[in-house]
Image (tube, rainbow, N blue to C red):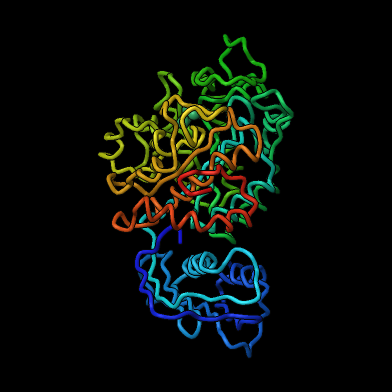
Amino acid sequence: MVPYPSEVTEASGELAVAGSINVVTADGAPSSAAAVNALVTALDLAQDADAAVALTLELDPSVDQGAEAYRLTIDSAVTVRAATDAGLFYGVQTLRQLFPAVASDAYALPRLVIRDSPEFGWRGSMIDVARTFLPLDYLKAHVERMALFKLNKLHLHLSDDQGWRLEIKSWPRLALVGGSTDVRGGPGGYYTQEDMRELVTFAALHQVEIIPEIDLPGHTQAALASYPELACDDVTNLGLYSGTEVGFSKLCLTKPDVIYPFVEDVLREVADIFPGRYLHIGGDEIKDPLYSEFIERADAIAARLGREIIAWEEASVANVRTTALLQLWNDGYDIQPALDRGNHLILSPCSFTYLDHGNYEAQPGVYSWCRAEGIPLERTYAFNPQSFTQAVGVEAPVWSELVEDEATADNRMWPRLAAVAEVAWSTEANRDYGRFTLRLGALRPHLDALGIQYFREPQLGW
Ligand code: TNX
């Protein structure tokens, strides 16, 4: 099992399941019901009220170790109890890992009792769809894969210099022009608002929340090429960009009458599509005397929309609401001012979690600016979020300057995202790299069944 549960008590013997099973779902718990139905279908088990074995999902408020906690009992029956649909859903994911990945005639489940709840509520994966556009179907497949490992936040980096990937109805050229190419000068692409609503609904059914990021006020060349009035008047380079430099573009912060209505329109439409609590406003890699003021005004716009902001660590210099989350990305960054103010952190330290870096030293086609030796599985696993105070959890980004396609995205994310999942879910006492490699190594057929084109990690025996 990955991530390893809080408490596993093994009993002796096995529970045999063959042919059919009596599935009883809980009313008002749609994601766990859908997950358990999908599981028994994949295992070729017929649902039959008279079957020898019952698989029951039960809402039980006494399971009170937090909103994602569950208990799984396997004795003469299989029972998952939780106070919430999310808890039941995670119980089903654990069960999914205890069954084989592919159907067979008969199954033997270990008798045991599991009590489980996560250490951190934020267990994230970030995909940069701005440098390289990836199709909606890939994002849906990724959500299903995340769910198996109890990852629950999919952060989409929706805009950058090389592309604007979200339809904005009040500023249509953003997607039509800004979305028309990518980092290699290829055809690019964008998601319609309908596409993203569909993804939000699909993700919710897998207990995954989509976190939309519009990167402001830097990383905005695609927006400037779409609407040149957003740039300062002395800027002459207003074309679409398909290189890999960073930090050269920005909204013109001395034109507040132009840029703040733009930011307000964009964030209003984003908030309308994505129902979650947070809007990620970027805020990275830009130097401007009016930077802090921009972040504060964007935070105020989010407040009027009833939302909180997330911003990259640089925004810690601004006086944002204490509800803002800051995303740490340089290992040693001095984030103390934000902690003093009371802000919480999403932990994405580049030397542990930047999955655009190699699975091994000198892997071709990867970045290495943060760690020359690459970021092997063991390194990601060694990250200890418990050493931070005021952290909501961990998130691993894949920047896509060098990620040209789905196979490459898979290679960068897997199996390292499974390590991220365990680091964020499991207790420090339950983490042990040797045991992790045995447990994850055994789940290879599950990754195969999901069609993941993972890196064949030698330390897993793959
Ligand atoms: C830094 S991390 C960036 C991205 C790049 C990435 C490449 C961060 C907030 N900004 O714009 O894609 O490095 O590794």
Q: Where is residue 22, by image quadrant? A: bottom right
User: Of residues 179 and 459, which is closer to you in this image?
Assistant: 459
Name the residue rendered at 40%, 38% in the picture. 352
User: Of residues 197 and 41, which is closer to you in this image?
Assistant: 41
User: Of residues 209 and 144, which is closer to you in this image?
Assistant: 144
Image position of 408 with respect to 272: above or below? above
Name the residue rendered at 53%, 76% in the picture. 108
User: Of residues 112 and 149, which is closer to you in this image?
Assistant: 112
Number of marks present in the image shown: 0
Q: x, y (%) of residue 367?
A: 50, 27
Image position of 209 with respect to 184: above or below? below
Residue 314 in view in this figure: yes
Q: Where is residue 365, by image quadrant? A: top right
Name the residue rendered at 39%, 48% in the picture. 393
Q: In the displayed image of the protein, which residue is found farthest to the bottom?
A: 50
Q: x, y (%) of residue 243?
A: 61, 19
Q: x, y (%) of residue 69?
A: 41, 67
Residue 265 in view in this figure: no
Q: x, y (%) of residue 47?
A: 66, 81
Q: Is residue 424 left or right of residue 334?
A: right
Image position of 146 with respect to 117: above or below? above
Q: Is residue 305 left or right of residue 430?
A: right
